[in-house]
Image: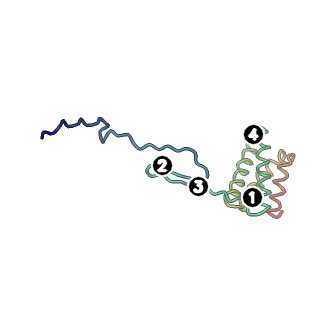
Amino acid sequence: MTPGPTPAPTPGPAPDERPGPTVHIGSVTGSAFAVGDHNTVTQHQHVGPTDETQAELLRAVRELRADLARFVTTDTTEVLDAELVSVADEIETAGAAEPGRLGRLQRALDAAGALTGTLASGVAVAEALSALLGG
């Protein structure tokens, strides 16, 4: 018996010409992931306010930031907004803003007093700070 013809090899990429791995991701919610070599994932937990006083400050801070966005930015309001962001971030991630951060916010609020004293949200932040700082 004579062997039949040998089938021709199927053409394809050479081993060193193969395309790299392909990753397809649909949508992801509430998760963190990394793809590839030497990647790291940092996930920030949002704890939320630890008590009602911190919750009230967080609400007032958010309202004041929204109100400030309606005005022309100055150096003073820019500093105030940065302190508002820092306080909000700390309450959301740690549960409470530390006294040092609250003191910096108080000083920035005082510096912008001509504007913030006329806004209900500015008064609310001042009252919440007073309750937390005892003054």
Mark 3 residue element? loop
Residue at 76% x, 41% y: name it. 69
Give the x, y percent position of residue 30: 61, 52
Q: Amino acid at mark 1?
A: Leu
Q: How far is disc 1 from disc 2 in space, using C-alphas? A: 39 Å
**Are discs 1 and 4 less than 8 Å apart at CB?**
no
Q: How many marks?
A: 4
State the residue position of label 4: 73
Tag shown at residue 43: 3
Q: Amino acid at mark 4?
A: Thr
Give the x, y percent position of residue 71: 79, 39
Which quadrant of the figure contains the C terminus? bottom right
Mark closer to the observer (2, 3): 2
Residue count near mark 4 (Cα–Cα under 10 Å), binned few <14, some 14–19, many ≥20 = few
Mark 1 residue element? helix
Give the x, y percent position of residue 126: 83, 55
Residue at 78% x, 43% y: name it. 68
Q: Earlier in the sequence, mark 4 or mark 3?
A: 3
Q: How far is disc 3 from disc 1 in space, using C-alphas? A: 25 Å
Q: Amino acid at mark 3?
A: Gln
Q: Nearer the viewer, residue 111 or 27?
A: 27
Q: Earlier in the sequence, mark 2 or mark 3?
A: 2
Mark closer to the observer (4, 3): 3
Q: Earlier in the sequence, mark 3 or mark 1?
A: 3
Q: Amino acid at mark 2?
A: Val
Q: How far is disc 4 from disc 3 in space, using C-alphas? A: 32 Å
Tag shown at residue 35: 2
Mark 4 residue element? loop
State the residue position of label 1: 102
Q: Earlier in the sequence, mark 1 or mark 4?
A: 4
Q: How far is disc 2 from disc 4 in space, using C-alphas? A: 40 Å
